Image (cartoon, grey):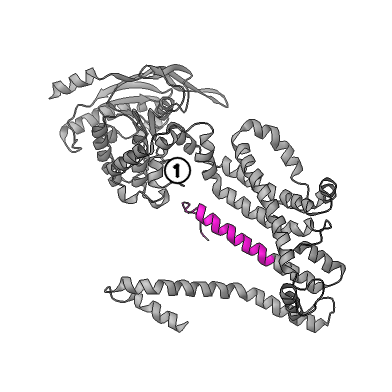
Amino acid sequence: MSVQTAVAAPSNGPATGTAKTTGTAAPANGLRQRLRTIALASIVPLCLLFMWDFMVRWTGTRLIPLPSGVATMMWDFAFGGIYDDAYSASLPIHFWKSVQRVYGGFLLAAVTGIPLGLMLGRIPLLRALLDPMLSLLRPVPVTAWLPLSMIFFGLGPKSAIFLVFLGAFYPILLNTVFGVKSVDARLYEAAEMLGCTGSQMFRAVVLPAALPSIFNGLRLGAGFAWILIVVGEMTGVPEGLGAVIMDGRTLSRTDLVITGMIIIGITGFLSDRILVLLSNYFLRWSPQQHA
Amino acid sequence: MLETQTHQRAAAPLILNVNGVHKEFAASNGTVEALRGVNIKINKGDFVCLLGASGCGKSTLLRIIAGFETATRGSVAVYGTEVDRPGPDRGMVFQDYALFPWLTVRENINFGPRHRGVPTPDIVKSTDRFLKMVGLTAFADRYPHQLSGGMKQRVAIARVLANDTDILLMDEPFGALDALTRSKLQEELIDIWKATKLTVIFVTHSVEEAVVLADKVVVMTAGPGRIDAEIDIDLPRPRDVSSPEFNTLRRDVTRRLTSHIARSQPVSATADA
């Protein structure tokens, strides 16, 4: 800490060589800022971890494992060599299956939700045709679709993908429609008087202008997709993080349940970060856009 | 000198003919008459200012010429062809710029040519030319939110110029700018107009702006919008706003404008004016 302060201080010094000093000070400040962010972000989780440990020891419960027990389980789940049971070193396969289903359903929702949203926002006839139906279906909880989806798609991954798709579809669709409707009408006029017509307008104006809202929808949709994977994998699939959590429940292995929860949390967080990076890249023109 | 100028102007072909334009808007209590019987003839290369108080329908008239609105009765014709929609022959510069925020300065300027399928080498050449003309070559790769208001409006002008427009329509384009930037842009606009020999229709509510810029000032009156007078401005350019001739003309135009405001406003408002 003190070293960083020493490096940063000369930037307030005399004008000669200021450019050089700032040049070296900037990365140090950036690193310091980063460390500070990480330190601040870890305070609450560390406190919770400590409280968890303390409460389990204090109450002497056998229903919830200690953090150290979960850590051992996570290690075994990832690399094996401790318990040597059915779950040892099986993380890659469960993880990979869930990622496939989450992104399968999410991408399906994106490739249908975005174009449909662009058209619904722009074509009043289509809106009159579909809006009432979509509004009727929207309040139905995705979990309520579980029995029907098992009838439609059988027991297996297709059902999980369908549920993830349903959960991600509405936020993506509604945000896209909202984005299109809030485009400044002047931009259409400007494009029109410059000779941009009909279907060109979608690519040239509607899509880029609605992009900030679309990214909001994608982030929400991806969040729902990770939420729904547990529900989706209740439908009798043998592999997947959701399936692991359901197995843990039936076997009363709470350490396994918590391990699954933590891995889903971390993966969901990382997948959101990726979307934020993409969004920052595609919306670099927007003054409202920051990390 | 004056004779040859007059001669040239008379010889220039008629580019825009506004013929008996009426415009009514539907309102909650019936219809509102925005324009009544407007006739204007504009020759190629003219710089015309539409001058009037707010609510006189000058912007509505400009939007009808642009093709964003249709006249309830009457017609607008460019080179004898009736206008029924917006088109590249009539380029509009809006007060709030209406730049595409996701495109760089360069991409904004070549938006029109790209969408009309102009060959790439020609696009590059014309973009560079108009970037230079508005003095933004160094800012070609910036995004609109990184520019000042004056720079944004320069981009909006270049965007229309690069699209090979015949008539430049400007709707209070400098209204949101500070006084210094405004007079700088007025000068630049005159230079651009001279260099490109464009026809310009410029909407403003500032008498001074109209007299500085125009060959012809069209004074409009409100309720419903009509044309009150067409005043030719024969002052030599560049115009000196402190000269007696300029001030005489400004006074005449102001008197013309305020006489109808006095007539159409209630008594209390007249006292304030």
* Callout 1: chain: B
Q: Position of residue A82 (x, y in %)?
A: 77, 80
Q: State the image quarter where residue B20 is shown.
A: top left
- Label 1, on which residue? B100
Query: Residue at position x 43%, y 40% from top?
Result: B98
Q: Give the residues in magenta.
A: A265-290
Principal secondary structure, stretch drawn in magenta: helix
Query: Quick check: A265 above or below B230?
Result: below
**Is A176 on the left or on the right of B8, as rendered?**
right
Circle 1 SS class: loop
Query: Quick check: A30 above or below A161?
Result: below
Q: Position of residue B70 (x, y in %)?
A: 48, 23
User: Is residue B37 visible to us here?
Assistant: no
User: Looking at this view, is A158 or A2 the one in front?
Assistant: A158
**Is A145 on the left or on the right of B128, as rendered?**
right
Give the amino acid type for the residue marked by disc 1 in the picture. Phe
Query: Residue at position x 44%, y 31% from top?
Result: A195
